[in-house]
Image (cartoon, rainbow, N blue to C red):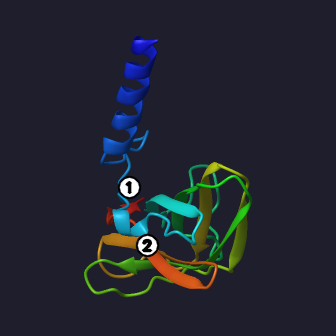
Amino acid sequence: MNKILLLAILFSTTLTSYSHTVSAMNLPTIVVSQAMKPSPNQNIEIQSVTLLAKEQKNSPIGQPPTSNRDIGFASVFFRLSNTVEKDSKITILSIKIVNVKDEQLQDFAYSQKEITLRPLQNSEIPFYLTNKTGYLGSDKVKAVITYQIGNQIRFVESEPVTVERY
């Protein structure tokens, strides 16, 4: 009995003291601080935001060149948890991709989306954004997600990443 209790205490201490997030594919991931943990009236914990940025000016191999194809690609992975035993809602108001150097907004469009998390659900929600112009300006960009839980509006940013250009 004492061994089980000791293992339970060790396991719970390890989980609460783990201080950073490591992505499975070794991608830049934002680490969420205590300020982003849910407040007493919030049920959703924001865990991380990961951005992959790619620009593909050359046509894919085997495809004829076309003038109206997507060139800029941004994949944003938003990881969150519902911390209570009832449904919780979060509304993603905007996702912006901006240059790190000068905060210049990149030309990606996003429509508002409401997400319902089931009781105690952990979820990674992908958003795939494209444009026909590619990335303008510097090589480093970040994702900025503005979200609403209840009547509180907040934002979270990804770590800066270098645009992969092909």
Is the C terminus in the top left, top right, bottom left or bottom right quadrant?
bottom left
Q: Residue at x 68, y 80 (%)?
A: 112
Q: Position of residue 153 (x, y in %)?
A: 54, 84
The picture quadrant where one finds residue 24 is top left
Q: Position of residue 131 (x, y in %)?
A: 58, 76
Which residue has dot 2 on it? 156
Count of marks overlaid on the render: 2
| 77 over 157 or under it: above or below | above
Above or below for 120 versus 137: above
Q: Mark 1 highlights which residue?
A: 29
Instruction: Give the residue at x 40% y 14%.
Output: 2
Tag 2's secondary structure?
A: strand
Q: Nearer the viewer, residue 33 or 164?
A: 33
Q: Amino acid at mark 1?
A: Thr
Closest to the observer: 132 or 66?
Answer: 132
Between disc 1 and disc 2, the foreground one is 2
> As drawn, is 67 to the left or to the right of 34?
right
Direction from residue 164 to residue 125 in the image, left or right: right
Q: Are marks 1 and 2 in contact (CB under 8 Å)?
A: no
